[in-house]
Amino acid sequence: MSEAALLENNFQLIAEILQAVAVLMGVGMVLAALFQLKKHAESRGMMGGQASMAGPMMLLVSGAMLLVLPDFITTAVLAFWGQSSDQAYNGGPTGYQSLVPAILMFVRVIGVGSFIRGVVLLSRSSGQQTQPGTLGKAMIHMFAGILCVHITGTISLIGSILGLA
């Protein structure tokens, strides 16, 4: 097995680990949201507090997004690019061109990590002591993650914008 294929297999393993971590984080977020909703319901029964349900609901939505991460990313790529599959790279089997599929896999893994980071920031965006701009950071992370997941389309888009292709 060549070094490029071995590197690509390692990035595939990292992607599977990242997906498993996302599912665990999703389960944790959903459970935390349910406990926060339970606490909110109990406090509303005792007294008429001014606590907001936005935090637990955003946590619940973010947890659900992480639980179905592959389907959600596929849907987001389809919504943005109009196609759900990535364009294949037609490189050569020798030299540096054999490393291009591994590099594309690395960028896709970074994109999924960025998307997960955006979802985590989104879950924190409606908290009581949240910094201003957290929602914007979350959206930028998610958008950049989608661009990295479909990296060949992003490269061709940048080439078209700059008049290189």
Image (cartoon, grey):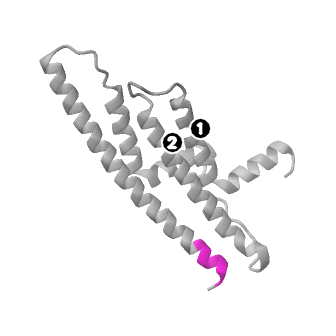
C-alpha span from label 1 to label 2: 7 Å
The amino acid beneath tag 1 is Ile
Q: Residue furthest left?
A: 46
Q: Residues within 10 Å of mark 1 (few under 14, many from 20)?
A: some
Q: Magenta stretch: residue 31 in it?
A: no
Residue 112's x, y, as percent?
Answer: 53, 53
Residue under numbered circle 1: 140
Q: Residue at x 56, y 31 (%)?
A: 136
Stretch in magenta:
2-8
Q: Is residue 90 above or below residue 28?
A: below
User: Would residue 103 be found to the left or right of residue 118 on screen?
Assistant: right
Residue 39's x, y, as percent?
Answer: 20, 30
User: Would residue 119 be found to the left or right of residue 136 on screen?
Assistant: left
Q: Residue at x 30, y 43 (%)?
A: 30
* Quadrant (top left/top right/bottom left/bottom right) for the N terminus: bottom right
Q: Residue at x 31, y 49 (%)?
A: 27
Q: Principal SS element in the magenta part? A: helix
Q: Residues within 10 Å of mark 2 (few under 14, many from 20)?
A: many
Q: Is residue 133 above or below residue 2?
A: above
Residue 44's x, y, as percent?
Answer: 18, 20
Q: Which type of secondary structure does the marked residue at label 2 adopt?
A: helix
Give the label on residue 118, or none.
Answer: 2
The amino acid beneath tag 2 is Gly
